[in-house]
């Protein structure tokens, strides 16, 4: 683990003072205590006077239950010794913002609900080595003045947020100046029926390094996953869909990997900006539609690598505006409006062994001459050439940029003439006597058959989620 | 039976009928004659409602011809028999019976037997010869026992035997009190059948009356010669009718 | 003897007693004539073979459908126009014979129209439907697309048969009528779109989305094409401009579009009927 340069408050300071005074209360909350108070009002809690009054934290395990001796989570945390466990039993907990100030495990059993009543953050992690698991976190109201989150970790290391459910929450998990944290196997549902201005991001990372975001299911937020100033993140097997803006949005976040995620039905798709070295493999970008919707938008990126991804049913599948040394290999572009749209600011793009089929326009460009890209061995369903030497590649180069796509790039309304006889004749004329389509966008060796292989992205992410989630059975997942 | 008053019709600048007055008497055979372009076809089409006259009146059996129902009393045999090629004669007979709402016992299928059409009834019409098709054409006109028969060049395209059968039938119809209007170029045929003659020249009635009167007027003994003379000597006094 | 103004003679007013069914009776015999004709068989076979070939060699059902759309939008209007005009001229003498029966002109016209339009529509539906039944339709979405294609094909058939009838009734000369029909086809399939394209280029500084939408809706071939475009190019159409189209056709527009296609059947039919009623044979 790389040492963190940020200020991180340790857990040892408060805990050591209270240690000696807590022996007598070890047994106040027993395991196996069945709670019947789920959903009941627990506004008043009666705490064991000795422990709380003396403030001694000595217990390895503290049981919290609405009807038990310890009935608030905050009290449970006060009582647990560093490295111990607070087990929260089913019930609804309404209490002021819970601050976790020591290394510990906060674990729900039977899906206890932590209810913010619409006006506060729920949990703030201010110590390293904290795990939060198995909680239902709800009603974190939207705020115009602060980014309220269900769980916020600030200036800590090694936090683990696993297997929680977030619903009706403004921000879900907010990691701020953290290191070595992981956010896995959570569900984020967002605030129902909210406008974009009143929704936050499900997973929001700011100035964070060495983080794992995996197997989360995210919907109904502004951005599903938001990164700013993040280093060395691994984002895998998440499903981020139906978000107002981006399924994934990151800026200034170098050296991150994105594998086997599904981003679909998001207002604007996925945007990657101002970043170096991005690797995306086996992801699925699907059904992101609208005037400014991209399966994947690359803006001012250096060294992006896209391998084995599926782009299906997007308005623009892959938009590259300012990308240097772009590697696009074995991706599938299927049934999109525009498969690949390259601005003239793209330098050294390499498109190899990708499949293009069912797109309104396979490849298009704004027609600039500065563009440098190389296509080789891609399969285009529209290719009409032949393969006399039977090497699997057509003997006639393919020009994936139609004249009509250049017209549409200039006069958007012309799109409605797509598939008309007149446009067919225009394209045929251009194919016979190429004059306007840029020479850079020619595949000299188009494949005769699909070459990208079967998609693995979507399926593995979906099945990973299915096997780890049992929504009908309200029990938290075992620690991973 | 049929009374026509001041019937006019122009196709654009071309006046085809310029005030036709005539009366077709019931139970008689009336031949409408005249040189090409005299207006014979147009007159017949006006009676059938195929062409809309510009002015004048037509009465059938004392009733003005309005709407479509009056045509149930008319049997029409057009000069050219062109039928849907993939239907059979039987289909055609059924179709017209269907359209006229005529049940089987109201139809007269004697001609089918006389023309020996039975073996051809179920073949597609396009496979039949022109003569056979003309026989079907004749059958259709007579089949529904119309009070008025309009026959346009009825014997054209028929062999002499069939022609004879058809003429016998026309005579029989007259005997049964039905009215027949026909056009023909075959003057021998006219001689044999015609009671009254209507002679049209340039859209006017040049002569209208019994054959005998025409012969008397022209001083000829044969209809053929009388016709020739009328054609030569036009205009004849149209008030002669 | 009372005198009657003759301009009313022969104009269709009260129909015979059997009237409500007369059109259907005429249609029934015309249909049984046409379904036995070779050109109809050829028409059906063309679609059958084209669809079969596309399904066999053109990749999956989706791609076959895509190609089929172009074929249908190209062939159906043209053939409906050509068949429509030829049919009415070929049937001219027989039409006169039918007119000499106690049958109203409106009924007869309707019967003739259905007599051609129904077999043409069935030939199209069978021609494209059977190969799909044989090879199997990919999924539900493709099923819907196939249904939209069939619906548009039938609407275009009805519409262009009506246009053909209108032309044929109003034009005495057969060759001229055929020329007019093909001219109409050229205008609606090619020239119209060409002019729209040039218009968009010239007027691109103005908000022209809605006028263009109106122009697309006003041409039956374009309307059918845009309806199908929404199924194949939905991704692209949901871009800026396209959003106008998806919004329109997503809401009440689908009903409006269907209504306008119907109008494209009704208006030429009614004009043709009016011409047929007043025509001198």
Image (cartoon, coloured by chain):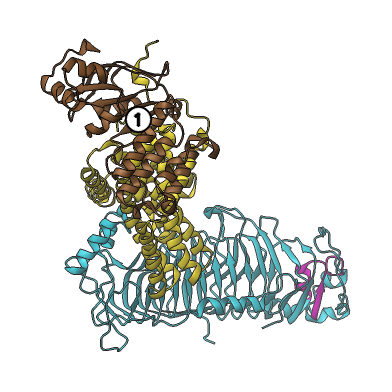
**Which portion, as a residue range, is magenta?**
A59-79
The chain carrying label 1 is: B
Residue C107 versus residue A428: which sits nearer the camera?
C107
Residue A275 placement (x, y as % from top left): 39, 74
Residue A152 placement (x, y as % from top left): 61, 68
- Furthest residue toward left: B232
Residue B108 versus residue A102: which sits nearer the camera?
B108
Q: Please identify the quadrant where the N terminus of chain A is shown.
A: bottom right
Residue C26 on the magenta segment = no
Residue drawn at x 24%, y 71% as measured from the top left: A371
Q: Is the residue A27 above or below the residue A187 in the image? A: below
Residue drawn at x 43%, y 39% as measured from the top left: C110
Name the side, left or right, on which A318 lies relative to B41: right
Residue B152 seen in render: yes
Q: Is the residue B180 above or below the residue A430 in the image? A: above
Q: Please identify the quadrant where the C terminus of chain A is shown.
A: bottom right
Residue B16 versus residue C259: which sits nearer the camera?
B16
Residue C38 placement (x, y as % from top left): 36, 59
How many numbered discs, if any?
1
Q: Is the residue B30 above or below the residue C267 in the image? A: above
* Location of mark 1 (residue): B150
Residue drawn at x 63%, y 56% as measured from the top left: A141
Q: Colour of chain A?
A: cyan
Residue C88 seen in render: no
- The brown-coloured chain is labelled B
Residue A65 on the magenta segment = yes
- The yellow-coloured chain is labelled C
């Amino acid at each position: 683990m790389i040492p963190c340069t940020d200020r991180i408050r340790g857990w040892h300071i408060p805990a050591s003072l209270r240690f000696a005074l807590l022996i007598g209360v070890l047994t106040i909350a027993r395991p196996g205590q069945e709670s019947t108070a789920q959903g009941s009002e627990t506004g008043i809690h009666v705490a064991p006077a000795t422990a709380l009054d003396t403030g001694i934290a000595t217990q390895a395990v503290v049981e919290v239950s609405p009807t038990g001796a310890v009935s608030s989570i905050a009290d449970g945390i006060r009582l647990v010794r560093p490295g111990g466990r607070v087990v929260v039993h089913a019930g609804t907990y309404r209490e002021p913002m819970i601050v976790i100030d020591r290394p510990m495990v906060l674990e729900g059993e039977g899906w206890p609900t932590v209810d913010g009543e619409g006006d506060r953050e729920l949990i703030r992690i201010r110590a390293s080595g904290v795990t939060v698991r198995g909680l239902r976190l709800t009603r974190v109201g939207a705020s115009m003045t602060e980014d309220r989150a269900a769980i916020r970790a600030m200036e800590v290391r090694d936090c683990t947020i696993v297997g929680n459910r977030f619903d009706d929450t403004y921000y879900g998990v907010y990691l701020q100046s953290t290191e070595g944290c992981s956010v896995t196997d959570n569900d984020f549902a967002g605030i129902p029926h909210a406008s974009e201005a009143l929704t936050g991001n499900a997973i929001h990372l700011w100035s964070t390094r060495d983080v794992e975001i995996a197997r989360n299911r995210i919907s109904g937020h502004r951005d599903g996953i938001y990164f700013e100033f993040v280093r060395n993140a691994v984002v895998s097997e998440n499903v981020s869909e139906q978000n107002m803006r981006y399924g994934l949005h990151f800026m200034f976040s170098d050296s991150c990997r994105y594998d086997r995620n599904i981003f679909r039905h998001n207002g604007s798709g996925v945007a990657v900006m101002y970043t170096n070295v991005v690797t995306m493999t086996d992801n699925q970008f699907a059904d992101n539609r609208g005037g400014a919707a991209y399966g994947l938008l690359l803006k001012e990126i250096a060294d992006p690598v896209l391998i084995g991804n599926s782009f299906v049913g997007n308005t623009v599948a892959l938009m590259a505006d300012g990308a240097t040394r772009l590697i696009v290999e074995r991706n599938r572009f299927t049934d999109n409006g525009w498969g690949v749209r390259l601005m003239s600011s793209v330098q050294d793009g390499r498109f190899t062994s990708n499949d293009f089929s069912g797109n309104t326009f396979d490849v298009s460009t704004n027609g600039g001459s500065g563009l440098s890209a190389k296509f080789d061995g891609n399969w285009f369903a529209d290719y009409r050439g032949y393969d006399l030497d039977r090497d699997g590649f057509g003997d006639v180069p393919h020009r994936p940029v139609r004249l009509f796509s250049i017209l549409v790039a200039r006069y958007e309304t012309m799109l409605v003439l797509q598939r008309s006889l007149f446009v067919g004749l225009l394209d045929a004329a251009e194919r016979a006597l190429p004059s306007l389509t840029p020479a850079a966008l020619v595949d000299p060796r188009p494949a005769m058959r699909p070459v990208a292989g079967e998609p693995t992205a979507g399926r593995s992410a979906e099945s990973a989620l299915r096997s780890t989630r049992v929504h009908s059975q309200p029990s938290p997942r075992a620690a991973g | 039976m049929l009374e026509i008053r001041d019937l006019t019709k122009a196709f654009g600048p071309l006046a085809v009928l310029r005030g036709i007055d005539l009366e077709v008497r019931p139970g008689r055979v009336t031949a409408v004659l005249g040189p090409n372009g005299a207006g014979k076809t147009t007159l017949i089409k006006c009676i059938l409602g195929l062409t809309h006259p510009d002015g004048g009146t037509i009465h059938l059996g004392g009733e003005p011809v309005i709407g479509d129902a009056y045509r149930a009393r008319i049997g029409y045999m057009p000069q050219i028999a062109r039928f849907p090629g993939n239907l059979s004669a039987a289909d055609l007979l059924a179709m017209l019976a269907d359209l006229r709402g005529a049940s089987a016992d109201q139809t007269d299928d004697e001609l089918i037997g006389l023309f020996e059409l039975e073996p051809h009834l179920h073949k597609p019409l396009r496979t039949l010869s022109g003569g056979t098709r003309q026989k079907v054409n004749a059958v259709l006109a007579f089949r529904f026992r119309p009070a008025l028969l309009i026959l346009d060049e009825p014997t054209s395209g028929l062999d002499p035997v069939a022609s004879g059968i058809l003429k016998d039938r026309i005579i029989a119809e007259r005997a049964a009190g039905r009215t027949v209007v026909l056009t023909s170029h075959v003057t021998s045929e006219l001689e044999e059948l015609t009671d009254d003659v209507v002679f049209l020249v340039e859209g006017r009635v040049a002569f209208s009356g019994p054959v005998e009167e025409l012969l008397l007027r022209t001083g000829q003994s044969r209809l053929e010669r009388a016709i020739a003379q009328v054609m030569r000597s036009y205009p004849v006094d149209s008030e002669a009718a | 003897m009372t005198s009657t103004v003759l301009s009313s003679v022969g104009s269709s007013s009260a129909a015979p007693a059997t009237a409500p069914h007369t059109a259907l009776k005429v249609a029934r015999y015309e249909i049984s004539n046409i379904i036995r004709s070779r050109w109809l068989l050829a028409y059906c076979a063309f679609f059958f073979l084209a669809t079969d070939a596309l399904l066999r060699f053109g990749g999956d059902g989706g791609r076959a459908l895509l190609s089929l759309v172009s074929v249908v939008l190209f062939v159906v209007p043209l053939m409906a126009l050509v068949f429509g005009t030829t049919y009415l001229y070929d049937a001219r003498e027989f039409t006169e014979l039918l007119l000499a029966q106690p049958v109203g002109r409106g009924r007869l016209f309707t019967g003739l129209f259905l007599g051609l339009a129904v077999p043409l529509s069935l030939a199209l539906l069978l021609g494209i439907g059977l190969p799909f039944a044989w090879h199997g339709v990919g999924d539900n979405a493709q099923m819907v697309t196939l249904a939209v294609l069939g619906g548009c094909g039938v609407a275009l058939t009805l519409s262009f048969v009506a246009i053909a009838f209108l032309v044929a009734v109003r034009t005495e000369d057969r060759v001229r009528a055929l020329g007019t029909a093909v001219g109409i086809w050229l205008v609606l399939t090619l020239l119209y779109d060409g002019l729209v394209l040039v218009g968009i280029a010239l007027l691109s500084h103005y908000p022209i989305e809605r006028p263009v939408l109106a122009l697309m809706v006003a041409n039956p071939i374009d309307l059918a094409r845009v309806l199908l475009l929404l199924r194949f190019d939905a991704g692209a159409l949901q871009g800026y401009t396209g959003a106008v189209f998806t919004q329109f056709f997503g809401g009440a527009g689908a009903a409006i579009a269907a209504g306008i296609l119907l109008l494209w059947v009704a208006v030429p039919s009614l004009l043709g009927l009016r011409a047929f009623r007043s025509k001198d044979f």
